Structure formats: C-alpha cells, structure tokens
Image (cartoon, helix red, strand yellow):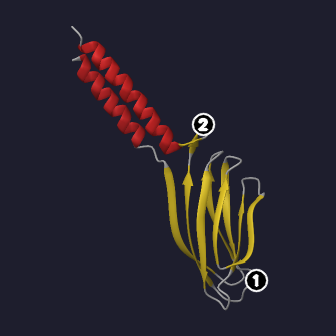
Amino acid sequence: MKAQFLFLSCLLLSMSVLSIKTVEAVSRTISVEAGKEEIENISLKVEDEAKGRISVLGGSDNDIDFSITGPNGEAVVSEERVSTMDFRFTASKEGLYALHFDNSFSTERKTVTFNYDVRHYIFGIPQEDFLVFVIMIVAVIGLLLFAAMSRP
C-alpha cells in the first residue's frame, strides 16, 4: 500500500511540474495608423529571454520605427525604418517591456506582423531543462524508496 501511495505521489508531482508553462509564444498582426504608435507589452522576470521577428507591409517603403523599452523606460532595442527585423534580449529587470511600433513619420497605414517567444530561466538554467532535472531526481528517489519498501 505504501508503495502505491509513493508511486501515485511521484506521478502527481511529475504531472504538476510538467503543467508549468515553460515558453510563452505570441503571434499577432496589427494595423498602425499613419502618424500613430502602437504598443505591445510583455511581462518578464529577470533573466527571461525574449526573441522574435517583425515584418511590415503597407505604405511606399513598407517600414516602421521599432523599439523596445524596459520597465523604467530605458531603451533595450531601437531601430528606425524597419521592414523586417529579428530581435533578442534578456530582461535585466522584472516588469513590463514595451514593444513600440511607431508610424508617426508616415502618412500611410502599416500592417505589422510580429511574433515572439519568451524563455524562462531558473538558477540560470532554461526552465524546461530544470524541470526535466527535477522530474529525474523525483523519479530516482521514488524508485529507491519503492525498492527499499519492497524488501521483506
């Protein structure tokens, strides 16, 4: 009976750990009106890594000013007249990071497609690797306890 309880406890713990969100991925298309700016916020923790890509359509040059600012308004990424761009940064502070799509220089509306994913880290290790490590340790401990309890 103890062995079954231990097995079910390990199984429940493993399933709970696996249910934790490891990577956040977003893909969106927005319209940025002429002379306007649109902002998309991302909530990050320290050491989270965000990477993504933007593509711009519309207007004569298919471009937009793109920047990312941190929780205190500091510039993390800043590029002018972008048509297509890849970006990557690591959060130095916890808080909201803002993706700015600035079309204030243009007289034409732009369509912006962007996607990004956020990878979380625990003790400097990617969260999914850390969780696999935790599951392996729990499984080994469970097997050792099961073997010890099964002896007459």
Q: For the point 50% across and 38% down, which residue is it?
A: 130
Q: Identify the residue shown where x is 42% and y is 38%.
A: 17
Image quarter where the N terminus lies is top left
On the picture, is 135 further left or further right than 111? left
Q: Amino acid at mark 2?
A: Phe
Q: Residues within 10 Å of mark 1 (few under 14, many from 20)?
A: few
Q: Is residue 129 above or below residue 152?
A: below
Instruction: Please give left or right for residue 35 compared with residue 116 in the image.
Output: right
Image coordinates of residue 47 in percent, x first then y, are: 64, 46
Q: Residue at x 40, y 43 (%)?
A: 19
In the rendered view, would you say 63 is above or below 143?
Answer: below
- Which type of secondary structure does the marked residue at label 2 adopt? loop
Residue 105: which disc? 1
Q: Is residue 93 positioned above or below 148 on the image?
A: below
Q: Nearer the viewer, residue 14 or 100?
A: 14
Number of the label disc, if any, that sits on residue 5: none
- The residue that label 2 is drawn on is 123
